[in-house]
Image: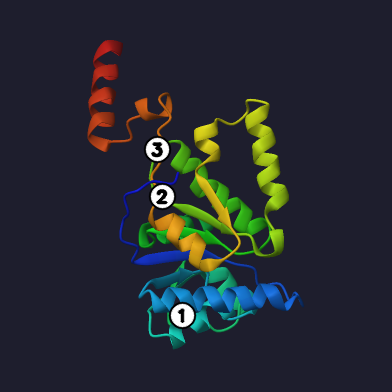
Amino acid sequence: MAGSSSHQIRNIFVFSGSSPRKEKEFLESANHLGQVLAERKIHLVYEGGSLRLMGGVSIAVFLGGSQVLGVVSKALAKKDLLGKTIGEELQVSTMSERLNTMFKHADVFIALPSGLGTLEEIFHISSWAQLHIHHKPIGLLSVNGFYDKLLSFLDQAVEQEFLTSSARQIIISVATAEQLIDQLQYSIPVIDPFMSRINWSTKESRKKLRLDLSLCL
């Protein structure tokens, strides 16, 4: 997905883990990512809370002077499972509403080391990119090679023709925050000739619906 043109990044959504891991490299990477975002005047949208990696990146961005918005489901907020959200907090009712809200507010998506929730959402966003619903860059910050085996699995899926090479290039992965943001800023989508035929325009969909109804009548 690398290209020579660039686009302005105002808001980055960062997925990150909240588990009490002891490896200091993960927390240091979250802190450093937050510092880099603040230095580049990029605002943070995240999952809310202040635990572990979520807290590390959000506090660093907030202290660095950039804006922070936490998108939190009401169920988690009521149980206080994430800790106090840094910056502003926007509560939503459902997980699907949460996904749509974070998608609306972000120009770019980054995943720090995390678990099932992050994997679900990063692949959801990636599948939307594959279907040409959006062209927002997606990146993995693979601290200590955290995502290497996942990327190997995706490469295997390409080899066995369950995934196209253009779809594989949707996800960018590097080990440092500076390199990842640079690559995301200069990334351009690789157009899949088959998927590019899909038209998600509401206006066009309505036209097709009217045509289908006319044919049925």
- Is residue 6 visible in the rendered image? The answer is yes
- Marks 3 and 1: in contact by CB < 8 Å? no
Mark 1 Cα shell of 10 Å, populated few (<14), some (14-19), many (≥20): many
* Residue at x 35%, y 25% (from the top left corner): 197
Sequence-first tag of 1 and 3:
1
108 displayed left or right of 75: left
Q: Which residue is mark 2?
A: 187
Q: Amino acid at mark 3?
A: His
Residue situated in front as seen by the camera: 15 or 203: 15
Q: Which residue is mark 3?
A: 132
Query: Horizontal and vertical percent for residue 166?
Result: 49, 34
- Is residue 94 visible in the rendered image? The answer is no
Above or below, 191 against 173 in this view is above
* Residue at x 31%, y 50% (from the top left corner): 5
What is the CA distance from the residue labelled 3 to the residue labelled 2? 15 Å
Mark 2 or mark 1, whichever is nearer to me: 2
Circle number at residue 61: 1
Above or below, 6 against 215 in this view is below
What is the CA distance from the residue labelled 1 to the residue labelled 3? 31 Å
Sequence-first tag of 3 and 2:
3
Query: Horizontal and vertical percent for residue 106?
Result: 39, 61
Mark 3 Cα shell of 10 Å, populated few (<14), some (14-19), many (≥20): some
- Tag 3, which secondary structure? loop
Residue situated in front as seen by the camera: 43 or 94: 43
Image coloring type: rainbow
Sequence-first tag of 2 and 1:
1
- Tag 1, which secondary structure? helix
Q: Amino acid at mark 2?
A: Ser
Mark 1 or mark 3, whichever is nearer to me: 1
Residue situated in front as seen by the camera: 152 or 214: 152
- Marks 2 and 3: in contact by CB < 8 Å? no
- Tag 2, which secondary structure? loop
